[in-house]
Structure formats: C-alpha cells, structure tokens
Image (cartoon, grey):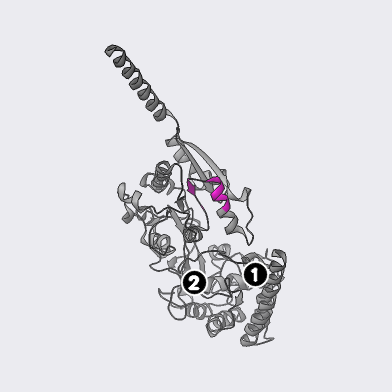
C-alpha cells in the first residue's frame, strides 16, 4: 500500500512537471493597438525588429482606423475599442487623453525593477511624457521625436552686409531682419528674407502663434480678437506686404515653385527657413555657407518650440500579457534598437548619444530646453479641428488677406473673424445637438 502511494505521488509529480514544461514552451502573445497600418509601422518605426529577435512571441496588430473614424466621437469610440479588444500595448496620438481617462498603466515599477536608464533619454522627451499626467509619472516611452529649427543662408547675409541671425531672436526681429534682404539678387532672381515652407496664412500663423489659440475647443468660443494676436500678426503682415515673405493668397496656384520653401532655400533664394534635421543631408552640397539656430521666440520671449513625439509605447492597465508588453516597450526604447535605427531615421532619437550630430553638424538647435506643454487632443469636444478648418479657416484667410491688400485694418479683421467665426461654430454646435436628439 505504501508503495502504491509512492507510485501515485511520483505520477502526480511527473504530470505537474510535464504541465509546467508545456506552459514554458507555449508561445507568448502580444496584442498591439496602433494608429497606423502595421506594414507602415514595420517600415517606418522598425516594428519587425522585435519579431525578428523574439520569434516565439506571437504579435497581433490592430489598427484603430479599421474600426473607428476620427470624428467628434473619436476619443469615446477609441476607449470602447480598447475595452473590447483589451490590447497589451497602445500606440495612439491621444496619449494625454488616455492618461486622463485612466486606461494606461504607470511604467515606473517596471523601469525601477529593470534599472532602465532614463538618464540616457533626452530630458525634454521625458518632460513631454510626464507633463501630460497629473501625478508626473511615466505612462509611456518614446524612442524618437521630431522638431524644427531656423536654418539661415550665412553667405546671403554677409554678401549684403547684413548681420547674421542670432540665438534668442523673436519672430518680430526675424521678420525685421528678413526685410533687409534684397528682393532680387544681382541677376534679377527673386529672393525672400524668410520662407515658411508653405506660404498661406494658416501655415504662418501656426508657425509663430506659440500658445495662442484661435478658438477654445472646450467652450467653442473664438479667441482671436485679442491684443496678443494683434501684436503677433502685425509684424508678419508688414513683412508679407513688403514682399520679403512669399505669400499665397486664397485661391492661388499652390504648384508655383516659389511656394516650395525647401527648394527655394536649397537654391539660395531664401535667407531663412524653418525645417527639421532631414534638411541637413540635402544641404551637404549647397553652394553657400549656412547655419542653424533654435526657433525664434514670442514677443514676450516665451518659447514657440514644440516637439512631436511618436510613437509613444504605452501599456493598457488591464494588459493580459503585461510582462511581455514591458519586454516590448523596453526593447523598442533600448540602446540596441536606437543604435540600429539611428542610421536611417530623419527624426531625432530620444537616446541623446545618437542625437548629437549629423554629417558633422550639431543637432543641438533641434533640442529645445523648453517646449509648449502638450494638451489632450479633441477631448470631449463637439466640433473637431476638421470642422474648424473647413468652415472657419476660410474666413480667417479672407479677412487677413483683406488686411494685406490694404482693404481693412488688422483690428477690423480680427473683430470680423471673431464674429463670423463664432457664427460658424454656433451653426456646427446646433447641427451636432440636433443630431444627438
């Protein structure tokens, strides 16, 4: 009888050991919800690197756009999709919104447990990721970011006896400097003192507005008829009127070569131009000397710089495979991955060791010490940016064009935009409320 008990225990132990062995051999699973096509993700962000290193982990991709559209209910529908699919990893433009909604897991315990070196990442990226959370914790990590700086044609300034741009200039000072550049070179070729890449008013306003907003998305009230907007727009309009900034009036042919800011700068026809670090390579054979500065400041000397951080790898708070999810986040933000991707990425890597220089040119101007704080996008709003762009932006463009054409004053234009824009917002709100009935 005693021998039978021993045999039974041995069999049970063998079965238990066999069961544990099966569990260890079962492939790990990982579900990733993302805001892009998975093929695009693999190509642009190196998503296949993880799968190559960990072939036993079965990765499933879910593209949010296959299930929801970016209308005024996008945030609510995204939250429903998350609850339904229960992904392990979430990559979304609504990172800040998801933190406020409480659906992301704080990564701090994993970071501490693995001694993940946050000091190796650019502090401005960490600040960006933390600034969207009320508890100042990290709910995501990002391996790269994009930003812009002010390129200038050093030769063009010196040839005309004009002081080159300097660090810490305001936009007003930049436009004043642009007006000193001749309108033509010695061969009669048209020159511009400053080029924005796109030459419509919306692009100019977005570049120089800093934290100024045309409308409050939460209250749906126009906020453009202010002294701050007046002070910001007046130097811009004066520079456009002088001919030193290219300007594309409403209805213009956008294919006109002079509206292509990058080409104009590369060809030496624009003295200053705002662009990202990708332009450095294109300027390697430029027939003139050039330099790069941090972005100009607002009139009150506050920053106008911002960074775009994408992708942000976050973990769902109810992730079923949280250890595998952290393994993924850790790998995509590792030194190994950054070193491999830094050779082909035009953006800046968050790991500072790989973002010091490019083609012998310092990348420091693209790394601001301060940025405009990111805010939740489209949060609980009834009217989307698309509605504003389609219905209100044409009013902005036309009224400010009338100022440029000397048909009215800037004060009159801002008041007209405020009133007409508010009327359009009210129409949109009424339509949404009627649809909700």
Sequence-wise, the earlier of marks 1 and 2 is 2
Residue 73 within the segment the image draws in magenta:
no
SS at circle 1: helix
319 w.r.t. 198: above or below: above
- Residues in magenta? 80-91
Which disc number belongs to residue 329?
none
Of the 4 image quadrants, the one containing the N terminus is top left
10 Å neighbourhood of mark 2: few (<14), some, or many (≥20)?
Answer: many
Residue identifier under label 2: 156
Of the 4 image quadrants, the one containing the C terminus is bottom right
Q: Furthest-left residue in view?
A: 2
Total labels drawn: 2
Q: Position of residue 335 (x, y in %)?
A: 36, 47
Q: Position of residue 125 (x, y in %)?
A: 40, 60
Which disc number belongs to residue 388?
1
Residue 394's image quarter? bottom right
204 w.r.t. 361: above or below: below
Query: What's the distance in space between the residues labelled 1 and 2, CA to CA?
Result: 39 Å
Q: Is residue 18 visible?
A: yes
Residue 84 within the segment the image draws in magenta:
yes
Q: Position of residue 122 (x, y in %)?
A: 37, 58
Q: Position of residue 219 (x, y in %)?
A: 58, 74
* Residue at image coords 32%, 19%: 9
* Residue at image coords 53%, 62%: 266
10 Å neighbourhood of mark 1: few (<14), some, or many (≥20)?
Answer: some
Observer-nearest of 206 and 68: 68
């Amino acid at each position: 009888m005693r021998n039978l008990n021993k045999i039974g225990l041995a069999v049970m132990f063998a079965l238990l050991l066999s069961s544990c062995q099966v569990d260890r051999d079962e492939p790990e699973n990982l579900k990733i919800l993302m805001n892009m096509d998975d093929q695009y993700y693999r190509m642009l962000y190196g998503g296949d690197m993880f799968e190559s290193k960990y072939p036993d982990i079965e990765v499933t991709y879910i593209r949010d756009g296959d299930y929801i559209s970016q209308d005024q209910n996008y945030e609510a529908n995204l939250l429903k999709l998350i609850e339904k699919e229960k992904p392990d990893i979430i990559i979304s433009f609504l990172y800040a919104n998801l933190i406020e909604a409480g659906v992301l897991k704080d990564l701090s315990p994993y970071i501490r447990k693995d001694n993940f070196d946050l000091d190796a990442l650019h502090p401005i990226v960490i600040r960006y990721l933390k600034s969207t959370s009320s508890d100042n914790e990290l709910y995501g990590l990002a391996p790269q970011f994009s930003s812009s700086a002010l390129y200038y044609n050093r030769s063009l300034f010196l040839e005309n006896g004009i002081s080159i741009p300097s660090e810490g200039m305001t936009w007003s000072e930049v436009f004043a400097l642009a007006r000193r550049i001749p309108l033509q070179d010695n061969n009669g070729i048209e020159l511009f003192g400053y080029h924005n890449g796109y030459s419509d008013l919306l692009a100019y306003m977005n570049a120089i507005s800093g934290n100024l907003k045309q409308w409050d998305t939460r209250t749906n009230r126009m906020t453009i008829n202010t002294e701050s907007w007046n002070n910001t727009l007046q130097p811009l309009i004066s520079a456009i009127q002088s001919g030193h900034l290219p300007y594309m009036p409403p209805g213009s042919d956008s294919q006109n070569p002079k509206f292509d800011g990058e080409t104009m700068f590369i060809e030496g026809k624009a003295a200053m131009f705002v662009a990202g670090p990708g332009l450095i390579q294109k300027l390697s054979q430029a027939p003139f000397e050039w330099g790069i500065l941090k972005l100009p400041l607002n009139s009150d000397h506050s920053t106008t710089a911002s960074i775009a951080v994408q992708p942000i790898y976050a973990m769902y708070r109810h992730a079923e495979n949280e250890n595998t999810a952290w393994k993924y986040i850790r790998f995509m933000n590792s030194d190994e991955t950054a070193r491999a991707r830094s050779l082909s990425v035009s953006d800046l890597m968050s790991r500072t060791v790989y973002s010091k220089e490019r083609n012998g040119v310092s990348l420091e101007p693209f790394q601001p010490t301060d940025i405009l704080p990111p805010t939740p996008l489209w949060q609980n709003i009834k009217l989307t940016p698309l509605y504003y762009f389609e219905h209100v932006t044409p009013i902005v463009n036309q009224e400010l064009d009338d100022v440029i054409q000397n048909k009215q004053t800037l004060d009159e234009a801002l008041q007209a935009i405020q009133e007409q824009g508010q009327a359009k917002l009210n129409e949109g709100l009424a339509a949404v409320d009627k649809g909700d009935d």
